[in-house]
Image (cartoon, coloured by chain):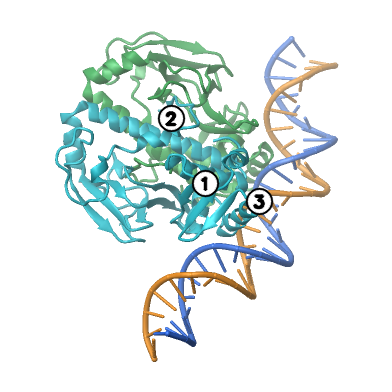
Chain colours: A green, B cyan, C orange, D blue
Amino acid sequence: MSTHAAIAAHANRAVPGYLVSALAISPASGMGAAIQPRNPADPLASLGHSKVYERETTVFSEGDAAGSVFRVMSGMVRLYKMLPDGRRQIIGFLQAGDMMGLAFAAQYLYTAETVTATTIQRIPRLELDALMDAQPAFARKLLSATTSELIAAQDQMVLLGRKSAAEKVATFLLRLSDRKGGEQTIDLPMGRSDIADHLGLTTETVSRTLTKLKSTRLIRILVGGKLELLDRDALADLAGGF
Amino acid sequence: MSTHAAIAAHANRAVPGYLVSALAISPASGMGAAIQPRNPADPLASLGHSKVYERETTVFSEGDAAGSVFRVMSGMVRLYKMLPDGRRQIIGFLQAGDMMGLAFAAQYLYTAETVTATTIQRIPRLELDALMDAQPAFARKLLSATTSELIAAQDQMVLLGRKSAAEKVATFLLRLSDRKGGEQTIDLPMGRSDIADHLGLTTETVSRTLTKLKSTRLIRILVGGKLELLDRDALADLAGGF
DNA sequence: CGTGAGTTTGACAGCGCTCAACGAGGGTGG
DNA sequence: CCACCCTCGTTGAGCGCTGTCAAACTCACG
């Protein structure tokens, strides 16, 4: 049934697979909404156009006709699917370089909303197809990025299916840190309910777990939605392996 | 954290996205281990060679050097990841046409084991790469297959993160049926613990849930690991979407 | 300073897990 | 060919983790 045509390789826990999934953004282009002049490291730079979205804005919804793909240039986006009765599962949080809406069907199959103010590049599917035709190497790069996505999705399955609440939260925090290159201090711009819906928990359980980590001196919660990892090793133990 | 470079489209519940992920096998080639003469519908047919694996055999293990990709020609394979303490999450069950081991890293990141006796085509990565170079359209096809995988993985996240035991089992049964084109009678060659480790449950809960479905006349358990869906609509209600 | 959304904390309950025993096949060896 | 055994599946009893419901608290914002 699920997850055929799967993928493999990558056993290096220090550098999670999904890191490579971010398609290169030239360092200078991080913030601007301007179209980038042709950049050999970023074949997408000259395509489509960028736009700034306010925080808590819908970019597209599950079921919308899928005419474009998107790339997050800065800020944060959540992707989620909903069950008919309203239960929500957040598929992932996107940051700079991540793509969404890559599709081979007619409609988007999840909803994308900004968490913070976010700059997003919109690329018409036709332009993307043309680029793949013109640069076969780019198709390979897209395949590689999608593969990395799949790897991340599989790790998330392990988390959702087999980890306890404490392990889930610890894993989540470590992933955010890894994504920042192992920084001690990480951003938590999303709310508790976002975290809960990503980890298969409730807001109360997330809150309680963070409180416990705080009182155990494993983390410190800072102002402005920031959080500091005080004992990375202890957190890694708690996480029970990725 | 997860699932960047994501995908979209496909809202048609009747035909699950992962169906298209199976790379075409020419009808005649389903069983044989012989190398297929060039078949325009199946560019992979002439690559590598096939081999029959006995039931409950390891094809490759998480961490093994990844030199080949594999395609299941017949039978069933389970893919899983394990946590250090032995907890197991089955990523998916593969059937005819499904691929595994597609990698862009040096090692397989999950273990593949046969459930039943299975014919598997092994394709050296070098040959696959050559094919992608020679036929750009094939790279697109692989990308499409991987995308479908990702879609299936995302559905599985919803299941694992937000569904009750009854919903999980009902969804699982319906997926198996869909995979067979909507047949009422499905095969369950895998054991209860396999199902449990796929759905994030225990064998006892799976067993209890099936018993309940049986006594509610929604399913009937047949001999030889087969199972009949007696009330598809009621099961779909129970499944809570998807 | 008032208001409201989001977070935290508490009390309690229930779903699903754990531990345990029993039953049903299926394979093996005497 | 049958008895034994071993694995797997089923069923039961009890409990614990996490969800539910509710209230207090914090803080940003007007």
Q: Which residue is mark 3?
A: B216
Q: Counting other residues with Cα less than 10 Å from the Cα at mark 3, is it few (<14), some (14-19), or many (20 or more)?
A: few
Could you say which quadrant of the image residue B6 lies in?
Answer: top left
Q: Which residue carries the number 2 mark?
A: B4
**Height in image: A9 above or below A222?**
below
A150 in relation to B93, above or below: above
Three-letter amino acid code of the residue under disc 2? His
Rounded to the nearest whole Å, what is the CA distance between mark 3 and mark 2?
Answer: 42 Å
Which numbered mark, 2 or 1, is in the foreground of this view? 1
Closest to the observer: C23 or A9?
A: C23
Tag shown at residue B173 = 1
Horizontal and vertical percent position of residue C7: 68, 33
Q: Please determine if labels 2 and 1 lie on a single subunit.
A: yes
Disc 3 and disc 2 in contact, CB within 8 angstroms = no
Could you tell me which chain the residue with mark 2 belongs to?
B
Q: Position of residue A228 (x, y in %)?
A: 55, 37
> Of marks 2 and 1, which one's residue comes earlier in the chain?
2
* Count of numbered labels shown in the rendering: 3
Classed neighbour count for the residue bearing mark 2: other residues with Cα under 10 Å, few (<14), some (14–19), many (≥20): many
